[in-house]
Image (spheres, rainbow, N blue to C red):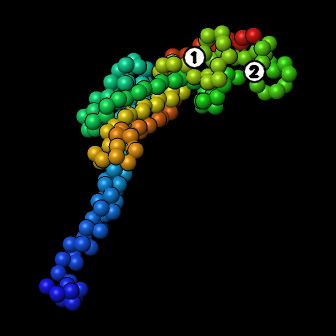
Amino acid sequence: MTSRRLVGDARGATIVEFALIVMPLMMILMAVLEFGHTLYVQGVLQGAVQEAVRSASLGEASGTAVDAIVTRRVQSLVRATDLDFEQKAYDRFSSVGRPEVLVTDNNGNGRYDPGDCWLDARPNGIYDQDAGRIGLGRGDDILVYTVVASVPRLAPLTGSFGISPTKRITAQTMMRNQPYSTQDPVATICG
């Protein structure tokens, strides 16, 4: 074949164009599938967490029974390799994630200093930066239930790009327990 005929020959051009487009197209397709899978797992996990907290709010389930509800629901639909649970109870919504309430602030700086008095929401005699008690709480408590699931990614080549082979998905919900028992009085501690 002469060089003039070779330059004018368009046979095989389609396969070259396809080769240039196929990799970006596959990467976009895998990203869309990965995103959809993440949304699906997030929805399943959030639904399982809400179902578990509803059963816990009635005071009939233990912490391990509540965790088992989530584990059973999630593991039946998704290959989660690890589930981490955190249950914290607060006496009111305004206390969630906040330090214990200061009763006496001797120097007026709004922070705990030795000698200040506080409401010991976690009855441990120590001023805590988070007033939540570990566990499901008692009647009328605010339950904050958090589950973190480690789920393998769909795309097998993520390690080649420096991406972790698993993704961590978090679901959290808050609910007030039914008033099936009374809240214990909170002691004032000075230290």
Dividing the picture into quadrants, the one containing residue 78 is top left
Mark 1, residue position: 183
The x, y position of residue 75, in whole percent, is 28, 32
What kind of residue is marked 2?
A: Tyr
What kind of residue is marked 1?
A: Gln
The answer to whether residue 171 is above or below residue 63 is: below
- Image quadrant holding the C terminus, namely top right
- Whether residue 76 sits left or right of residue 122 in the image: it is left
Mark 2, residue position: 112
- Image quadrant holding the N terminus, namely bottom left
Residue shown at the point (47%, 35%) measured from the top left:
172
Specify which label sits upstream in the sequence, 1 or 2: 2
Taking the view exactly as shown, the residue that stands out farthest to the right is 107
The answer to whether residue 187 is above or below residue 101 is: above
The answer to whether residue 79 is above or below residue 161 is: above
Residue shown at the point (57%, 16%) measured from the top left:
183
